[in-house]
Image: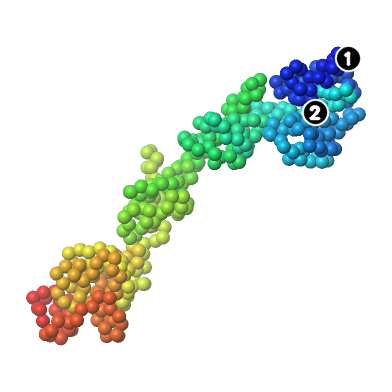
């Protein structure tokens, strides 16, 4: 028996006394029991205990035996521990694994780490069997993947971090991930988990849910996923829909970036569905409503408004009164003189004052006059951006009537 005590006290040749050996089996039962009160605790058991003292080297735990047991610093957690207070607190009740006895006085040697790991293995085996999703924080980024804390060191291969290729793993450090157990080898202390499997299953559920409820004419919430020259792809929650550039605004735009940014939340209308090809066409401008439906309420015949020249044609200039509402200033209405081409008077980008001559909401047309707005500004002594003095010969009103009538041969 004395020889057995010495063996326990001194440890093996390659391991210092008192240091744990993760690969070794629990201390020899007979040697341990030489010191153990047989009626209380036995090596290999998991028992409850209360933390009664904390020091820099370890923790004393009262497990109901004749003397407290000790947990050395390295036996507190599978994580690196610098201070016992980071793991346990005075008075806390914890589960511990009985390793055996050490020292000449036969101090009870305990391990919280081993108890936690045994519970963790059982939980992981159950999760693998049932397909349960578990949550675990990322504690390390290592070559080939992530280390997660599942009560022991679990590993998420880089190929299982996301549905696609992940170039940088560092951003995941400290995050809590939703994972599924895909492989366990308890003898090799190996637990492999996957976030990719969880994401794929959730995407499949979202896909099926959306296609079972989506209908043409619905207003849906989405997020701008990407922009292209011809439009934007909107994530509707697991399924992408196409928002064509022509359906983004009632006014002309050259690129989707004028209206949208990646990551922006949007409300869109479902315009068309192709369930066989799983294609969704969306509209953004329809959600805000067609400004032409109420244009007559905002622009009255005879009223003078400010607009921006957005396009020139041989027959006149198009002026934007508001996004989606353009009016035409016919070439005969640009100035109180004969104009050969609109660029003699206005240019794209100019902000000008115009008078509304006629509003046709059904045909989506508004006739405008710059020269009549200029006349009104002169009459009321208002500043003019583009004004021309009347040519000699003939009263100004007679010349205006001639131009309005289209009598191009009358030069005054």
Which sits earlier in the primary sequence, circle 1 or circle 2?
A: 1
- Can residue 134 be seen in the rendering of this structure? no
Disc assigned to residue 42: none
Separation of residues labelled 1 and 2 (CA atoms): 22 Å
Q: Which residue is mark 1?
A: 2
Q: Secondary structure at mark 2?
A: strand
> With 42 as the anchor, is 325 left or right in this view?
left
Which residue is rendered at x = 65% and y = 24% of the image? 189
Which of the two residues, 242 or 225, is positioned nearer the viewer here?
Answer: 225
Instruction: Name the quadrant containing residue 307.
Output: bottom left
Residue 53 x/y as whole percent? 84, 38
Which residue is rendered at x = 19% and y = 81% of the image? 389
Q: Secondary structure at mark 1?
A: helix
Seen in the picture, residue 291 relative to 126 is either above or below; the reply is below
> Tags 1 and 2 in contact by the CB under 8 Å rule?
no
Which residue is rendered at x = 27% and y = 67% of the image? 309
Q: Which residue is mark 2?
A: 110
Which of the two residues, 331 or 99, is positioned nearer the viewer here?
Answer: 99
Quarter of the image with the C terminus is bottom left
């Amino acid at each position: 028996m004395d020889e057995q005590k010495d063996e326990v006290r001194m440890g093996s040749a390659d391991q210092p006394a008192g240091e744990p050996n993760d690969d070794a089996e629990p201390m020899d039962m007979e040697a341990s029991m030489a010191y153990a009160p047989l009626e209380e605790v036995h090596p290999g058991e998991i028992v409850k205990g209360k933390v009664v003292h904390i020091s820099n080297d370890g923790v004393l735990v009262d497990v109901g035996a004749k003397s407290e047991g000790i947990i050395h610093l390295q036996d507190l957690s599978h994580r690196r521990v610098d201070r016992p207070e980071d793991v346990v607190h005075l008075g806390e009740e914890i589960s511990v694994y009985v390793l055996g006895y050490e020292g000449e006085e036969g101090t009870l040697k305990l391990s919280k780490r081993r108890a936690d790991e045994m519970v963790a293995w059982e939980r992981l085996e159950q999760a693998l069997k049932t397909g349960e999703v578990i949550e675990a924080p990322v504690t390390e980024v290592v070559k080939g993947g992530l280390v997660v804390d599942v009560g022991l060191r679990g590993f998420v291969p880089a190929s299982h971090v996301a549905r696609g290729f992940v170039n940088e793993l560092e951003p995941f450090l400290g995050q809590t991930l939703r994972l599924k157990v895909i492989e366990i080898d308890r003898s090799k202390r190996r637990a492999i988990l996957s976030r990719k499997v969880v994401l794929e299953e959730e995407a499949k559920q979202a896909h099926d849910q959306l296609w079972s409820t989506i209908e043409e004419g619905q207003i849906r919430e989405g997020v701008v996923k990407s922009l292209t020259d011809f439009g934007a792809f909107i994530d509707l929650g697991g399924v992408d829909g196409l928002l064509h550039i022509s359906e983004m605004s009632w006014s002309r735009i050259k690129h989707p970036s004028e209206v949208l940014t990646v990551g922006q939340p949007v409300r869109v209308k479902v315009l068309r569905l192709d369930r066989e090809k799983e294609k969704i066409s969306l509209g953004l401008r329809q959600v805000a409503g067609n400004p032409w439906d109420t244009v007559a309420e905002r622009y009255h015949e005879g009223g003078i408004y400010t607009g921006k020249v957005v396009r020139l044609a041989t027959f006149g200039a198009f002026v934007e009164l508001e996004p989606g509402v353009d009016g035409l200033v016919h070439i005969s209405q640009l100035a109180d003189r004969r104009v050969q081409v609109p660029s003699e008077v206005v240019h794209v980008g100019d902000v000008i004052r115009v008078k509304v001559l006629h509003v046709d909401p059904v045909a989506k047309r508004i006739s405008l006059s710059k020269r009549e707005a200029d006349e009104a500004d002169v009459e009321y002594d208002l500043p003019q951006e583009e004004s021309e003095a009347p040519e000699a010969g003939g009263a100004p009103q007679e010349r205006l009537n001639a131009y309005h009538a289209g009598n191009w041969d009358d030069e005054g």
